[in-house]
Image (spheres, rainbow, N blue to C red):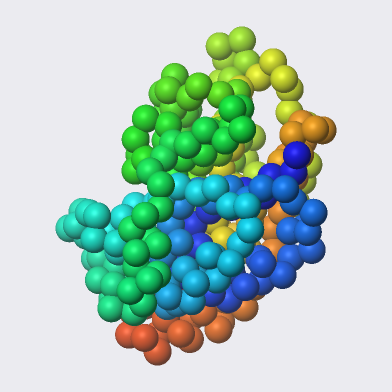
Amino acid sequence: MRYLIFSDIHSNYEAFEKFLGHKKLKNVDKILFLGDLVGYGPDPDKVIGQFQELPNVRSVRGNHDKVIADLESSSLFNPAAAFSAEWSKLKIAPANYQFLKQLPKGPQIIDRFITICHGSTFDEDYYVFSQFEATESFKFMETSIGFFGHTHFPIIYFLRNEKLDIVPLTENTRIKLDTNTRYLINPGSIGQPRDKNPASSFIIFDSGKMEISFIRFAYDVTATQKKIRAAGLPELLASRLEAGI
């Protein structure tokens, strides 16, 4: 079984469109999305509409999805995130708003051996940025393999013989997984990478070969920046895209 795993589009239609045309998306059996269709970017309605056309998708909601669907307040967001969230609510068609509202809460278990979540396995909004946080997430994970988003930072945490190690993911690479090891894997972000690399990223997981393929691709950052500025969204949301922060 070949799984496509991606996360954090954040209303970036240029990045999402380029992702959808990537040759690696052919011949996958299931698509797993880890949350945050919307927020930050200038095209929430287009992204939600395009996302719904994908086949064989299992997904979980992200924190921006919840806020923009009025399931939570934007009061805990930073000013740029809160502004974009409130702006986004005005730009989404009623049917797409309802779709956003109905996205499942994580974690979800897929095919009995994969866990997907937005933040962590114990709290859908909790950031996994360190070994301590990964260790806690492993404690609540019922499967051998888990995929998470939220941080926009591509990385693999692996637990073997009660020892936790880390493999940052930077360039295109393939990694063989060990059946005696547990994994928490972040594919990075489609729409707003934050590992100082503006290129979007995603993962293909081949469960037959027990192999992860980490893939990066460039998109038209300038076009998205122009849209953000034209919409009157905070400048930070445009400038950070080219810096990958």
- Vertically, is 91 above or below 245? below
Q: Where's residue 43, x and y in %?
A: 45, 77
Q: Choose top left, top right, bottom left or bottom right for residue 128.
A: top left
Tell me the residue at 37%/55% (across/down).
Answer: 102
Q: Choose top left, top right, bottom left or bottom right for residue 84.
A: bottom left
- Vertically, is 157 above or below 229? above
Q: Residue furthest bottom?
A: 230
- Vertically, is 169 above or below 160? below
Please state, as top left, top right, bottom left or bottom right, where the N terminus lies in the image.
top right
Q: Where's residue 70, x and y in %?
A: 24, 61
- Vertically, is 161 above or below 218? above
Q: Where's residue 210, x and y in %?
A: 76, 31
Viewer-proximal residue among 146 and 240 = 146
Q: Can the viewer see residue 245 in this picture?
A: no
Q: Where's residue 163, x and y in %?
A: 57, 15
Q: Choose top left, top right, bottom left or bottom right for residue 175.
A: top right
Viewer-proximal residue among 86 and 33 = 33
Residue 224 located left or right of residue 99? right
Residue 177 located left or right of residue 201? right
Q: Can the viewer see residue 48 in this picture?
A: yes
Viewer-proximal residue among 100 and 117 = 100
Residue 167 located left or right of residue 109? right
**How many numbered circles are shown?**
0
Tell me the residue at 28%/78% (across/down).
Answer: 90
Tell me the residue at 62%/73% (across/down).
Answer: 17
Q: Residue furthest top?
A: 161
Tell me the residue at 25%/65% (across/down).
Answer: 82
